[in-house]
Image (cartoon, rainbow, N blue to C red):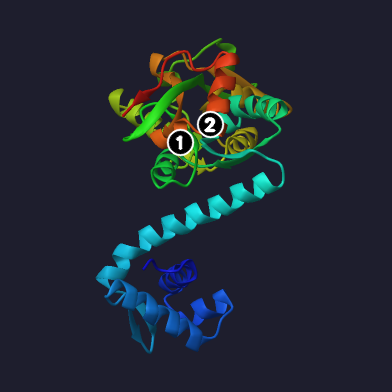
Amino acid sequence: MLPDIDSLALFVRAAELRSLTKAAEASHIGLAAASRRMALLEHRFRTTLLERSSRGVELTAAGASLLPHARALLVELNQMQAEMRDHANGRKGALRILANTSVITDTLPDDLAAFTHHNPDVKVVVEERWSEEIVRALQAAEADVGIVVEGTAVDGLDTQPYCLDRLAVVMPNDHPLASFETLSFNDVLDDELITLEGGASMTRLLAAQAAIAERTLQLRIQVRSFEAICHMVASGLGLGLLPGQAARVLAKGLDLSVRPLNDAWAERRMLLCMRKERAGTASVSKLLSFLCERGHLPEPATTH
């Protein structure tokens, strides 16, 4: 007999809160009922999942093994319920997209606006994450489509080329480097730099290229958004490094100059990623076909 969903949800809450009492409260049931549900769940699996003590509960080895499966199952169930609600409300599909900061501030908004205009029956949900986080979420079946920078490990996922961006330097208009049309990376390495936090693929790329040049990045400030980079630059705290299109949009009104990096590696390709079993679903197929019509995806999909 399969375990019931409510008991699995209770188990996940207890594991996360380290307390069956708190899990029962969060589930809006009494402690006695919660204890019976956990006992029945352990009976069905024929093993102990939680070690109880006066301090709360701790996962056993079996419980630690069950936890990621239970979480994934609950995510899928929630997504199923959301999609069925969409069908009940007249929408024919829901598309869950995770995208990195570069495309969310550049190409993606216009593409999604046009896509939803032509496909009003498809509900689109978008969330911004780092590229590596996106891949993990796709592998865990937490989204339909991800957009990551090329070079990110995408094992087991289908990929399609999406768009290109070129990194650029943002600086005050009166900075000496603003007199040049383009800049090399070496030109900016003597200045204090402002970029994204270390978890961003762009920041790791900059650090790697500085190491190749046997130079050190002078990272004065690291933030979580391109907008914050530009405001820091406008305050005179250093030079900003970010994708060129985003830089040009955000620099407007801040009295800043934008100059592209002319290094070959500064041009980056963005990839659409998806699990193989999701590539043929109606909503994902609609998105891929639409992007092809807009001039994206010039190459066939590949599997890693």
Q: Label 1: state its secondary structure.
A: helix
- In this rendering, would 170 be left or right of 252? left
Report the label total.
2
Question: N-terminal of the two: label 1 or label 2?
Answer: 1
Which residue occupies 37% across, 59% down?
A: 68
Cβ–Cβ under 8 Å for marks 1 and 2: yes
Q: Which residue is mark 2?
A: 284
Q: Position of residue 117 (x, y in %)?
A: 72, 27
Bin the neighbour count of mark 1 within 10 Å (Cα to Cα): few under 14, some 14-19, many 20 and up. Answer: some
Residue 300 location, quadrant: top left
Bin the neighbour count of mark 2 within 10 Å (Cα to Cα): few under 14, some 14-19, many 20 and up. Answer: many
Residue at the extreme front: 1
Q: Amino acid at mark 2?
A: Val
Q: Position of residue 221 (x, y in %)?
A: 50, 42
Note whether 262 is above or below 19 in the view shown: above
Which residue occupies 54% across, 55% down?
A: 78
Q: Amino acid at mark 1?
A: Arg
State whether residue 55 appears in this view: yes
Q: Which of 162/80 is in front?
A: 80
- In this rendering, would 97 be left or right of 14? right
Residue at the extreme top: 181
Which residue occupies 32% across, 78% down?
A: 43
Note whether 3 is above or below 141 in the view shown: below
Note whether 286 is above or below 93 in the view shown: above
Q: Position of residue 257 (x, y in %)?
A: 63, 21
Marking on residue 278: 1
